[in-house]
Image: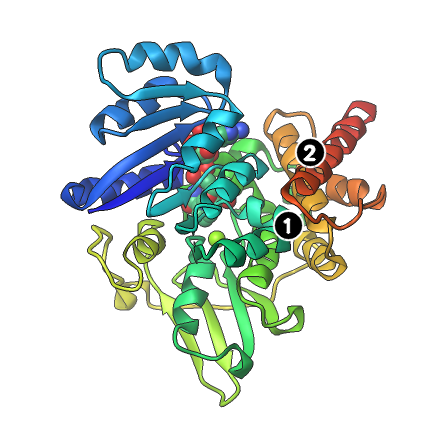
Amino acid sequence: MRTISVLGATGSVGASTLDLIRRERDKWRVIALTANCSAVDLARLAREFDAEIAVVGDEGCLPELREALEGSGIEAAGGQPALIESAARGADITVAAIVGCAGLAPTMAAIEQGGTIALANKEALVSAGEVMTAAVARHGATLLPVDSEHNAIFQCLHGEDLADVRWITLTASGGPFRDATLDQIIAATPAQAVAHPNWDMGAKISVDSATMMNKGLEFIEAFHLFPVGLDRLRIIVHPQSVVHSMVEYRDGSTLAQLGPSDMRVPIASALAWPRRMDTPCEPLNLAAIGTLTFRAPDETLFPATRVARECAHAGGAAPAVLNAANEIAVAAFLAGKIGFTRIVAQCEDVLARGIPAAPASLEDVIAADADARRQALGLLERA
Ligand code: NAD
Ligand code: MG
């Protein structure tokens, strides 16, 4: 029996995780399940999985959660401190699947317990960078990437020496606008942007995928997870999303991980690591897929990967500022307040206003994030 907590249980990655746990109920004991506010959904999951505690990040949703859990014997809690406390209950494995920098403090609390963290919440690692990787080392925690590309790279690096790596290549689907013209991109609506051709995901990452900021964030994520140096990381567009990423070694061998576009595969890899577990995913039918294609990214149409690479090179608080500016811009786009191409342009505008000193602690990262959000909101108001 292993214990597990799922931070962001009501989301897309949370649902995929719980679907796997549901299939081997006898092997897992669920400690904490969390959500932002979907109290009824969260309570239903907490009852189904007999969780120890259910937590809503938004304290205003706590009365609804309490009511929905009445008579169950399951603890109900709300607010950021409760989220952090539940993440610190020392589960053997914590699936970090909150979206955005909102997941940073709970993820750090889980890391401080020294257990295994299955990390989907890339924004937390992008923002905190060395503050998070240092905490992982200090507390003897194990960080297993769930993001499909990073999980692929992790698998391709298993048993290898980083000194032998020539390239790590992140694949990108290119998102829904990969074949669009500039005019179509300028006119893109939120409904078009969230309609991803290959993956079924939450709204924020779907928009990031459409702008290619998702790949930009993943570039920074890879830099922290696999310290081979920025000049050994590159991005290639692969519209079929079958090859999830690759590692080329100095002898000319390239190892790749292939699989269906189903997050249950990388999640299962993290849950069972270093072994394997069954998933209900469709087996890969390469004969039916027929063709795998690859092409270089177009950074004129999609500047996000260039902007993210520049932030990775700048280091310090630059990635945290980029991430915060992007979160605000994506929310504004989804709310119909700005056009699609303003998302990345607004990130550049916020970055141009200056970068705070390199963060040395979680508090520093949270302050840099909050400051960048204020700048981004200020720019929106003046627009
Ligand atoms: P989602 O929007 O479907 O779910 C997000 C979860 O976080 C929900 O449970 C929500 O209630 C919770 N949440 C949102 N804001 C919160 C807040 N302020 N405080 C506390 N909880 C909050 O998102 P998702 O698509 O499941 O993505 C989750 C994370 O995984 C993201 O960082 C994303 O980049 C990453 N990821 C997702 C996929 C995917 O296929 N969906 C793939 C790779 C990586
Ligand atoms: Mg990914």
Q: According to the image, label 2 marks what residue?
A: 339
Question: Are dots 2 and 1 in contact, CB under 8 Å?
Answer: no
- Residue 165 vs residue 113, the one in the foreground: 113
Q: Going 48% across and 80% down the picture, which residue do you hit?
A: 161
Which numbered tag is attached to residue 142? none
Quarter of the figure that contains the C terminus: top right
Amino acid type, residue under disc 1 in the picture: Thr
Q: Earlier in the sequence, mark 2 or mark 1?
A: 1
Secondary structure, mark 2, is loop
Q: Is residue 214 left or right of 345 when viewed as pictured?
A: left
Q: According to the image, label 1 marks what residue?
A: 181
Q: Going 27% across and 11% down the picture, which residue do you hit?
A: 70
User: How far is disc 2 from disc 1 in space, using C-alphas?
Assistant: 15 Å
Q: Label 1 neighbourhood size at 10 Å, few (<14), some (14-19), many (20+)?
A: few
Q: Is residue 168 left or right of 216 when viewed as pictured?
A: left
Q: Label 2 neighbourhood size at 10 Å, few (<14), some (14-19), many (20+)?
A: some
181 is higher (above) or lower (below) than 87: below
Query: Residue 299 at what x, y percent from top left?
Result: 69, 58
Question: Which of the 4 image quadrants contains residue 368?
Answer: top right
Question: Which of the 4 image quadrants contains residue 47?
Answer: top left
Q: Residue furthest bottom?
A: 251
48 is higher (above) or lower (below) than 164: above
Query: Residue 42 at what x, y percent from top left?
Result: 34, 24
Q: Is residue 155 left or right of 354 when viewed as pictured?
A: left
